[in-house]
Amino acid sequence: MQILKDYINGQWVTGTGELLDVFNPSTGEVIAKVPVTTTERVEEAIQAAAEAFKTWKDVPLQQRMGYLFKLRDALLNRREELAQLISTDQAKHIADARAEVDRGIQLTETACGLPLMLRGDKIAVNAHIDGEIVREPIGVVGALSPFNFPSLVFGWFVPFALGCGNTLVYKASEQSPMFMQIIAEILDEMGLPKGVFNLVNGDRPVVEHMLNSKDIQAMAFVGSTKVGQIVAEGCAKTNKKAMVLAGAKNTMIVTKDANLQGFAENFKNACFGAAGQRCMAAANVLVEEAVYEQVKEIMLDVAKHVAVGDACDESVYMGPVISRQSVERIHKYIDIGLEEGCTLLLDGRNPQLPEKNKNGFFVAPTILEGVTKDMRVAKEEIFGPVVTLIKAQSYKEGIDLINQSEYGNGGCIFTETAIIAQDFLRHTNSGMLGVNVGVPAAMPYLPFGGTKGSLLGGQYKAQISDCVEFFTKRKVATIRYYGPNQA
Ligand code: NAD
């Protein structure tokens, strides 16, 4: 059985503490063990990063970009291996896993343009005084990844943090830790100076130690709102900069004049891509009454034909969810929906699967009908392939649903009426919106992040200039120029 390792100060080290099981969610088998890095080891990683920062911050920008170019080439060379790993321990369907690896590559490529983004500014204060703004790295950054996007979140944090001149202590998700093992291997083989990138593993105690450390200057987190709040509060107490991208509950609206063919093409990926375990998944579908029956038929027809199976099997569309606990949570939410008075248009509990996947963590596409905006199933993050179907008099009820939500990551509308699209874009309090787009996840060159409970801490978003804002601090200098002495 593979025992995963920590990578600290340029060395691979075996864990001395507790070992957690890593599952293949498609089969339910334990495929590896991941250490919960001990407090002493986490501290070693922090100190290694602090020491490395003293020299890494002064490595010429062009040289730092050289490392990012090498990283990008190595990712391209190992693309398939990385995708297979994501498909195995995180159980994202292989096509989706390849797309996620590609997103990590695109983000690395975007970070290669950092010299253009790291520019400061200068202003003539008067004839002999200049004001200067210079961007500098912040120091040691602690990074925490969720289980569902190992490559995307790597791409948000690693190339930008290192490219800006910071050093990293990165904690992979204990549920999908294998991708980051290869990243550490790549960075090691590239000859990155020791201590610049450190990989630790585990869960809560590791995070607590990082939050309490006085030698970490910033924490970058992606995960649930519950844990995000712990991270944001911990950072506030120790005066750390905090990027906290958190949970979501996204609504897709269909108006009576919508292009239903377009909706049909987008619905499957929006709701059931990655088994609904995306912070940008559409979890509520709110439909205007005039087209409700038609949309319901489309949804049922598409959803019942979603091929569910082993995530590594090219012929299926959707793999399992991450864990047995996730299956239980999703089943519980289906029960809650039924207790609240909705009905099951499609029941994905206990799907039929081949023998080798009998112990996997599967829930097939599920549609709850008769849902109203005040029900828990319409408001809370279920994080699985469960969609609520809501009948509405007007799309405006969809805007209300989004605005009343504790989350504000994303939302979209299918409509052919420009003024309705504009009304939706203008009056919806959410970070990433789409018109006739199923999953409006922002491209690598646009800011990525939500509002309300989806974006905590310092309200820093991910990607492009928002990453530069987070991973640097601005220093302002006022400089006076005297002429030669007149005496
Ligand atoms: P999670 O919050 O359970 O875990 C995230 C990280 O926090 C992991 O590294 C985990 O080890 C650590 N952690 C877990 N419990 C902790 C505790 N009590 N104290 C300290 N650290 C703890 O999230 P997850 O289940 O891995 O990921 C899914 C969540 O992430 C969903 O809510 C999803 O919406 C969200 N997400 C958000 C975005 C976004 O861009 N907003 C992107 C991806 C995922």
Image (tube, helix red, strand yellow):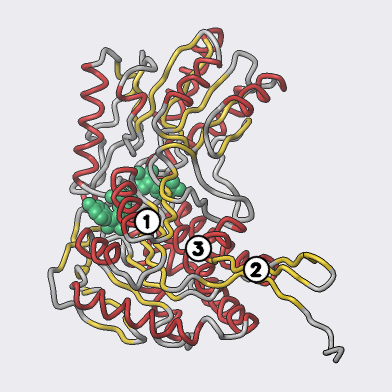
The answer to which of marks 2 and 3 sits earlier in the sequence is 2
Residue 160 occupies which quadrant of the picture?
Answer: bottom right
**Residue 319 in sight in this render:** no
Q: Is residue 86 above or below residue 414?
A: below
What mark, if any, has residue 155 been given in the picture? Answer: 3
Tell me: 63 left or right of 90: right
Please rate how many residues cluster around mark 3, counting C-alpha atoms within 10 Å: few if below 14, some from 14 to 19, many from 20.
Answer: many
What mark, if any, has residue 312 been given in the picture? Answer: 1
Q: Is residue 255 above or below residue 37?
A: above
- Out of 189 and 485, give the one closest to the viewer: 485
Residue drawn at x 29%, y 66% as measured from the top left: 210
Mark 1–mark 2 Cα distance, whole angstroms, equals 40 Å
Q: Residue 316 in the image: state x and y as whole percent.
A: 40, 46
Residue drawn at x 33%, y 67% as measured from the top left: 178
Q: Amino acid at mark 2?
A: Leu
What mark, if any, has residue 118 been given in the picture? Answer: 2
Q: Residue 74 in the image: state x and y as whole percent.
A: 52, 77
